Image (tube, rainbow, N blue to C red):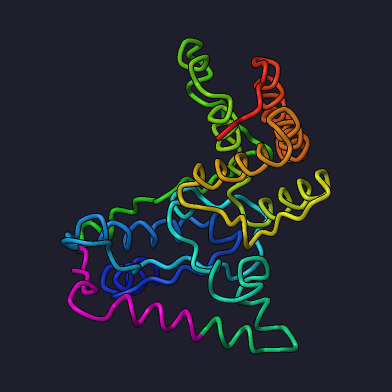
């Protein structure tokens, strides 16, 4: 079936709703299906204004593994479908005793699809058969090692690293932890921060952004304003440690590298 019907559907469909779970991120076939549809978006000129949201990722089941970066680079639909959609997934809402959130989520998702394909800008040309059959993958389906952390490139260039503001260093360190871009891990990270600072950081208020750096920067600035730089960075270090010891050590290094003065203005 994959060699025939599914690639043809991905190459001709007017919208693509990706129902995410851990198996989706590990599936070679799902990676290829995503690539086929996204390649159509890359090839099409939508003219002036933002392109319609024809590719809609939404969590189907709670995920334990990090979301592939190519998926994370797109706006996650489940953040605004209904309460619980991002953490429980659509399937979780379906098994609730109260089905109202599930019905609302389905209604809103259907509305997003209808809105995306409505009008001339939502007409996406099909992909030629020879291209859709290339078996190209959108992401590597070999999962990253748990807790993996990638040092910022600037860290390996001392002159460049030294010129960065400590806030920017912290943002880059956080961005190097791929598990933070996974909704369950991000929610847990905010929960640990909330407990450490004895003040709530609600996931809905501090939702993941695309790209992640602006959201991380806003959170770090908020913590700086409330606790001062040193305390804020120590809180982040403690909250990050369960995900990546290397990343936590990098945050400790940022604190050690600088003598801090309070931010003003």
Q: Which quadrant is the N terminus positioned in? A: bottom left
Foreground of the two, 4 or 127: 127
User: Where's residue 146, x and y in %?
Assistant: 68, 41
User: Where's residue 66, x and y in %?
Assistant: 60, 50
Location of residue 148 by image quarter: top right
Does 197 appear above or below 46? above
Does 8 appear above or below 65? below
Foreground of the two, 231 or 131: 231
Is 80 inside the magenta-drawn segment? no
User: Where's residue 212, x and y in %?
Assistant: 51, 46
The residue lying at 24 percent from left, 73 percent from top is 122
Q: Is residue 19 left or right of residue 118?
A: right
Does 198 appear above or below 23? above
The residue lying at 33 percent from left, 67 percent from top is 7
User: Where's residue 260, x and y in %?
Assistant: 67, 21
Q: Is residue 34 left or right of residue 123?
A: right
The residue lying at 41 percent from left, 83 percent from top is 111
Is 112 inside the magenta-drawn segment? yes
In the current view of this chain or complex, which residue is farthest to the front? 265
**Magenta highlight: main SS:** helix
Foreground of the two, 162 or 199: 199
Q: Which quadrant is the C terminus positioned in? A: top right
Does 225 appear above or below 161? below
In the current view of this chain or complex, which residue is farthest to the top? 159
Location of residue 25 by image quarter: bottom right
What stretch of residues is rendered in magenta? 107-127
The residue lying at 62 percent from left, 46 percent from top is 180
Q: Is residue 114 left or right of residue 29?
A: left
Location of residue 240 by image quarter: top right
């Amino acid at each position: 079936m994959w060699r025939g019907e599914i690639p043809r559907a991905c190459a001709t469909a007017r919208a693509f709703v990706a129902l995410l779970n851990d198996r989706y991120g590990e599936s070679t076939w799902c990676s290829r299906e995503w690539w086929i549809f996204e390649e159509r978006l890359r090839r099409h000129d939508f003219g002036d204004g933002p392109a319609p949201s024809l590719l809609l990722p939404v969590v189907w089941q709670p995920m334990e593994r990090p979301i592939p970066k190519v998926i994370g680079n797109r706006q996650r639909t489940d953040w605004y479908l209904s309460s619980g959609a991002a953490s429980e997934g659509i399937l979780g809402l379906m098994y609730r005793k109260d089905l109202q959130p599930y019905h609302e989520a389905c209604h809103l998702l259907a509305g997003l699809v209808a809105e995306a394909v409505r009008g001339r800008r939502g007409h996406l040309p099909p992909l030629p058969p020879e291209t859709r059959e290339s078996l190209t993958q959108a992401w590597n389906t070999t999962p990253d090692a748990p807790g993996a952390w990638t040092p910022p490139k600037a860290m390996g260039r001392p002159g460049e690293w030294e010129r960065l503001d400590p806030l920017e260093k912290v943002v880059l360190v956080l961005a190097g932890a791929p598990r933070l871009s996974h909704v369950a891990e991000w929610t847990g990270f905010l929960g640990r921060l909330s407990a450490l600072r004895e003040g709530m950081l609600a996931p809905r208020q501090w939702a993941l952004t695309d790209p992640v750096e602006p959201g991380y920067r806003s959170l770090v600035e908020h913590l700086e304003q409330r606790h001062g730089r040193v305390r804020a960075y120590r809180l982040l270090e403690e909250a990050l440690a369960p995900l990546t010891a290397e990343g936590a050590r990098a945050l400790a290094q940022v604190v050690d590298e600088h003598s801090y003065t309070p931010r003003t203005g």
